[in-house]
Image (spheres, rainbow, N blue to C red):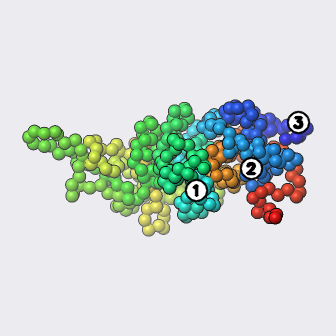
Amino acid sequence: MGHTSAPSLQEKRFAAYTDGLAKAAGHADRSAPLKAYCAGLLLPGERKSVEPMAARLAPDNVRRTHQSLHHLVADAPWSDEAVLGSVREHVLTAMKRNGPVAAWIVDDTGLLKKGTHSAGVARQYCGQVGKQDNCRVAVSLSVATHHASLPIAWRLYLPESWAGGRERRKATGVPEEIGFQTKPAIALAQIRQAVEQGAPPAPVLADSAYGNETRFREGITELELQYAAGVHGNLAVWQPGEVPRPKKRRKGRGRPPTRLRRDAEHQPVSVKELALSLPAHAWKIVTWREGTRQKLQSRFAVVRVRPAHRDQKRSEPYPEEWLLMEWPSGETEPAKYWLSTLPAQTPMTALVRLAKHRWIIERDYEELKQELGLGHYEGRGWRGFHHHATLCIAAYGFLVIERSRFSPSAHPGRLELRAAKIPPHFQPRGSPDARRTA
């Protein structure tokens, strides 16, 4: 970046880290802009879109740097999966020095976006504002130890309104093989890919938007992974110790019946009904971690149940699993429910701590959005959206490595990475303070 003094140890580590990422991106011409892009994301500055980063990186040569960075994210055909694989390899090695991988965490995040022409933009629920709004939504899979976490897969959710829109797909470069998939289907594909790539196995955590879907939970089990997945209060289960009626014997000739059955006196119940029917002594106070001001604790109960979703179409009952329920003190009814395939000998405290470990990725997204500019990409294309996110995750991965070494306070803008001084009158396009000219 135009400096003559010797690089710091942190700069040397950053250079070694980005060397590995550049190799994963393939073509040698991508090496310098990729390293610069990651540095630009980590340097101080409010906007992390291409032009402001170009100004911070090369204030005397903004135009050429802007073109180089823009080409890298918007046009260059490098593989997001290959670069994220390199990030995972480097960062997990550092993370595991402080403890094993404890969980894989499924999540999705909304990124506000104006207009209707950017890939995947639609009016849909956006967690960033807690309501329906014009936004993009991306599904991610993260790996977490007890101390740190990192997204290892990231994909834009393409609403049905986009899936069949030929003109918009072509204009934004949505690949032909990408059709409509539900968010749980995207997440399950990410989990399957992580298994194939040899990511250290761990229980999968997901909220009720994913866990309530039977096919999602079954898919995790088929991959020989355990889960602790949120479910809705109306999900049907058999009471502890109960199973569906066995197939009815038929007299005479004909094909013997194979499906399970129910009758008027023998029906499953919702998990909410089951929770409300439990005696008071079934609920125990459990502390799952230290909060910033106090211990985090609530009331929980656990029972062994069998899910009942469409089991009339099955020949064997679903296996038993844990139903974990939370009913905070002072509330009129239970608040949350989870199904879990952890072993039958698992203590309730361990179940609670695992189910609640999803909190750890909140920090990831807070920093990715607020400090690393995850939602700042201004282009409309599918490729650019994913390339920018991949490099944001790569830059965040370097922070995770540094924190795992000796510096928990490592944050964007406070690293030993240096940049040239920006000219005082420079105003990037898109800046709120940019002057309109005739």
Q: Quadrant of the N terminus?
A: top right
Q: Is residue 348 above or below residue 89?
A: below
Q: Nearer the viewer, residue 84 or 224?
A: 84
Element at label 2 = helix
> Residue 406 location in percent, x, y?
74, 41
Occupied quadrant, residue 345: top left
Residue, disc 2:
50
Which residue ends up furthest to the left in the rendered image?
252
Sequence-first tag of 1 and 3: 3
In this rendering, position of residue 407 left or right of residue 359:
right
- Residue 6, label in figure: 3
Q: Say what amino acid the circle numbered 1 marks.
A: Val
SS for dot 1: loop
Type of residue at label 2? Val
Distance from Cα at disc 1 to Cα at disc 2: 20 Å
Residue 387 occupies quadrant: top right
Q: CA distance from mark 1 to mark 3?
A: 45 Å
In this view, the residue in front, 303 or 108, is: 108
